[in-house]
Image (spheres, helix red, strand yellow):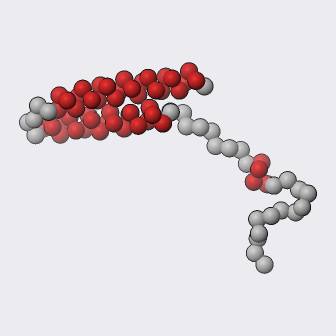
Amino acid sequence: MGDTGRGIPGTPDPRSSVPRQEPADMPRLALYALIVCVLAVAAAVVSFLQGSWLGIVWILLAGLSSNMTWYYARRGRVAR
């Protein structure tokens, strides 16, 4: 019949010897801040191309999220 997922009684489970995946290099908050930064820069470019001065707000948001990216990435490195 089919495999029930159980090994031979008394033997170690082969799945338990598989190494666990390493954590991501960049903390999750840093990654989210980086995504926001990239999207804000893209929005600023589109805004300026359309002739709107609203792009200045997007540039400020990109600067803020860039600083957040550096902060959370550095905090993650120090924690390790």
Q: Does 15 sit above or below residue 62?
A: below
Tell me the quadrant of the picture where the N terminus can be found: bottom right
- Quick one: which residue is furthest to the bottom in this view? 1
Instruction: Using residue 52 as the reference point, say whether residue 25 is left or right of it.
Output: right
Residue 19 picture quarter? top right
Instruction: Using residue 14 as the reference point, say whether residue 80 is left or right of it.
Output: left
Residue occupying the point 19% across, 36% down: 45
Instruction: Using residue 72 as the reference point, say whether residue 8 is left or right of it.
Output: right
Q: x, y percentage for residue 16?
A: 77, 50
Residue occupying the point 27% across, 29% down: 61
Residue occupying the point 79% across, 54% down: 14
Residue 31 picture quarter? top left
Residue occupying the point 88% across, 63% down: 8
Q: x, y percentage for residue 60?
A: 24, 26
Residue 57 picture quarter? top left
Q: Does 4 sit above or below residue 56?
A: below
How many callouts does the rendering have? 0
Instruction: Using residue 80 as the reference point, say whether residue 39 is left or right of it.
Output: left
Q: x, y percentage for residue 28?
A: 48, 36
Q: x, y percentage for residue 44?
A: 20, 34
- Quick one: which residue is furthest to the right in this view? 10
Q: Does 16 sit above or below residue 64?
A: below
Tell me the quadrant of the picture where the C terminus can be found: top right
